[in-house]
Amino acid sequence: MEKAKESLEASKEEAERVSSLSFTPHRLGVDVTSFYRYFSLRGIRVDSYRPGFISCTFKVPPRLTDTNGNLGSGAIATLVDEVGCATVFVEGQPFNVTVDISINYVSTAKLDDELEITGRVLGKRGSYFGTSIVVKNKASGEIIAEGRNSLYRNPINNSKM
């Protein structure tokens, strides 16, 4: 347990770097981005969009790699979730909430690899949507991960209850 605690402790230099960061608090309903989204999605580019389909490109940055130089599994999960949500996004409608997600990690992506991330709507029933997201290496075509999202959109309710 002590080894685990030691490995999680920040060095003096790391603590000073973190202390010097200046971010304003996220204001719910006002800010459309947060530190987390900015950190994890900065650099993603939408190449193509039409209702029910989105295609994006993302170059693996150093900030999202693990100690082996691979894109972290949490970063892949974030990309799958965010692209899945973007696939069913409708301007003026409430944001979608992921209620279930499954991801198959097939291969690894390395630092500076360019990824192609595509999302497709599989179906819709009421306020629920199903999406499929594929993350692949753009140069080799190798699949990095395949994910499925179940999303819920709260219908606009104008009642005063």
Image (tube, grey):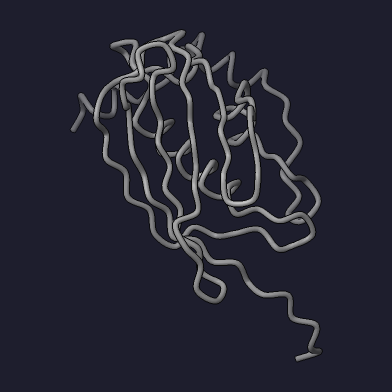
Between 11 and 71, the one nearer to me in the picture:
71
- Asked where in the image residue 18 lies, by quadrant, the reply is top right
Who's the residue at 54% across and 66% down the image? Answer: 152
Who's the residue at 73% across and 75% down the image? Answer: 156
Between 46 and 112, the one nearer to me in the picture:
46
Query: Is residue 85 rendered to the left or right of residue 94?
Result: left
60 shown above or below 83: above
Who's the residue at 63% across and 25% down the image? Answer: 45
- Asked where in the image residue 43 lies, by quadrant, the reply is top right
- Residue 23 position, x and y percent, is 72, 30
Query: Is residue 58 rendered to the left or right of residue 65?
Result: right
Quadrant where the N terminus sits is: top left
Residue at the extreme front: 50
Who's the residue at 60% across and 25% down the image? Answer: 44
67 shown above or below 45: above
Query: Is residue 55 rendered to the left or right of residue 110?
Result: right
118 shown above or below 97: above
Residue at the extreme bottom: 161
Q: How many marks?
A: 0
- Residue 47 position, x and y percent, is 63, 27
- Residue 79 position, x and y percent, is 48, 35
- Residue 92 position, x and y percent, is 79, 59
Quadrant where the C terminus sits is: bottom right
Query: Is residue 112 rendered to the left or right of residue 66?
Result: right
